[in-house]
Image (cartoon, rainbow, N blue to C red):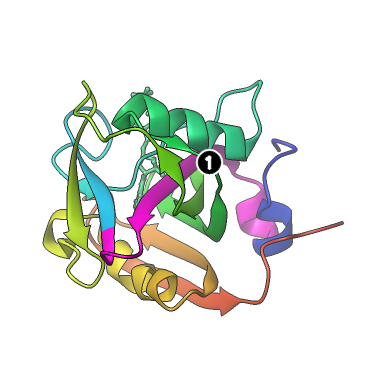
Amino acid sequence: MDPRSVAKYIEDAEHLQMAHRLYTLIFPLDRQANRVLLGMKKRGFGKNKYNGFGGKVEAHETIAAGAMRELHEESGLSARSLDKHGILFFYFEGDSVAMEVHVYVTGEYAGRAVETDEMRPEWFDMDGMPFEKMWADDPEWWPMVLEGKRFVGRFWFKNDMVTITRREVAPVDSLEFSG
Ligand SMILES: CNc1ncnc2c1ncn2[C@@H]1O[C@H](COP(=O)(O)OP(=O)(O)OP(=O)(O)O)[C@@H](O)[C@H]1O
């Protein structure tokens, strides 16, 4: 298991046997205007869906550094601070690899959002997320971001990538896990 993974603090023995791949997902917020920056994904996994910015954590970097790097690569923004909000695990039917997604928000960033090869950025009202064009799990945890709560979520998807057959989602006091 990747030493940066927090799976051992959250998952059961059966799922801990799966390979895990680490991802980041970060949402830039404009709290004064009550807006959030989403990106329309133009290619790859989640194409034609709105999402926060993020991707695979690379071998040499911390998870937080990966979140900052992906935000910059995909939106042009440079985060000056990060606030970790949640951990999500996704299991897809027939796929032996679990996705472990570390979810952040940032209210402090430099630069202007620009369209990149991967993402077309667009601001949305924080209470008006385009959930019909987002991943099916998003409406189940986004309200906890709005409420300032930290959360852990586990979602089991059918291989249609839309149908959720089982979920465990709950607020948590802290995401600072320790041995
Ligand atoms: C299943 N339900 C889901 N709900 C919400 N968000 C989801 C998600 N499933 C994946 N995500 C996010 O989608 C991005 C994929 O990243 P992805 O494009 O594959 O990575 P990366 O940019 O490294 O890709 P390249 O290999 O360079 O194309 C990454 O932020 C990841 O957290």
- Label 1: state its secondary structure: loop
**Residue 77 is one of the magenta-drawn residues:** no
Which residue corresponds to the image point at 53% horizontal and 41% vertical from the top-left?
Answer: 80
Front-lying residue, 159 or 135: 135
Which residue corresponds to the image point at 36% horizontal and 56% vertical from the top-left?
Answer: 29
Residue 139's place in the image compared with 112, above or below, is below
Residue 111's place in the image compared with 155, above or below, is above
Residue 128's place in the image compared with 95, above or below, is below
- Label 1 neighbourhood size at 10 Å, few (<14), some (14-19), many (20+)? few
| Residue 179 % position (x, y) | 87, 56
Say left or right for 31 vs 150.
left
Q: Mark 1 near ligand 1 (CB under 8 Å)?
A: no
The magenta span reads 11-35
Taking the image in four quarters, ligand 1 sits in the one at top left
The residue beneath circle 1 is: 80
Which residue corresponds to the image point at 66% horizontal and 33% vertical from the top-left?
Answer: 62
